[in-house]
Amino acid sequence: MPQLTPEEIRKRFQTSSEFNETFDAFEQALEQRIDDMELYRQLFWNPSLAPHELCLFGEKLAKEFPHVAYDTFMWLANVFEVTYSMVDNHELALKYYKKAASVHADILDPYLAAADCFEPDLNIPPLGVLIEFLKQGVAHIAEPKILYRRLAEFYEMNGNDEMSGYYRRLAQEGSTPDQEPRSEE
């Protein structure tokens, strides 16, 4: 196959409905060491790609170019959150928000975005899983007040007034928890 220019790769990412053609363009982009996230965003928005195909591309891109892993995971999470809701991919969105947080645990965005994708009527992603993710974020975020507020809201939704009150107090005080009260979620 002749080598594609970056513009030809972009066009294939945008318009190709054939997986093999898209994959070949992706492989060429990697071989050419193209690490431009704007190019790969075109790939991630290609409506012909299934979620598992997007995951394949995203995981390979993050492995090949670790310096764009955070952006890759955040972008995938956003795509899953807004594009595939009819097949219930909020859990896939959460998976990639978690991956983004594993790359940069000290950035607030993955935690807040994950909290925002919660669908209370369907309990997706599961509230307990979201709570645990936000609690992990508290340990890494310099100013965790906003996470405390979200934790308080989620515990309230979950019917746990003790934990809700605990996190509301932390949000007001702006302190870091010494030891969380023992209580069932």
Image (spheres, rainbow, N blue to C red):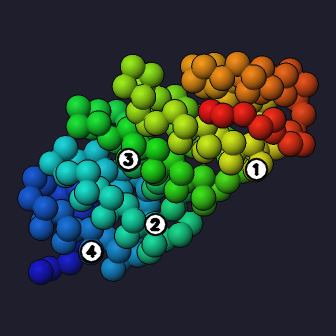
Q: Residue at x 55, y 37 (%)?
A: 128
The tag earlier along the polypeptide, 2 or 1, is 2
The tag earlier along the polypeptide, 3 or 4, is 4
Asked which quadrant contains residue 10, the reply is bottom left
As rendered, which of 1 and 172 lies closer to the eye? 172
- For mark 1, give the secondary structure: loop
Residue 62, label in figure: 2
Residue 119, label in figure: none
Q: Residue at x 27, y 68 (%)?
A: 26
The tag earlier along the polypeptide, 1 or 3, is 3
Asked which quadrant contains residue 176, the reply is top right
Q: Does residue 135 appear left or right of residue 5 in this picture?
A: right
**Horizontal and vertical percent position of residue 167:** 77, 27
The tag earlier along the polypeptide, 2 or 3, is 2
- The amino acid type, in three-letter code, at marker 3 is Leu
Q: CA distance from mark 4 to mark 1?
A: 36 Å
- For mark 4, give the secondary structure: helix
Local crowd size for mark 3, using a 10 Å CA cut-off: few (<14), some (14–19), many (≥20) = many
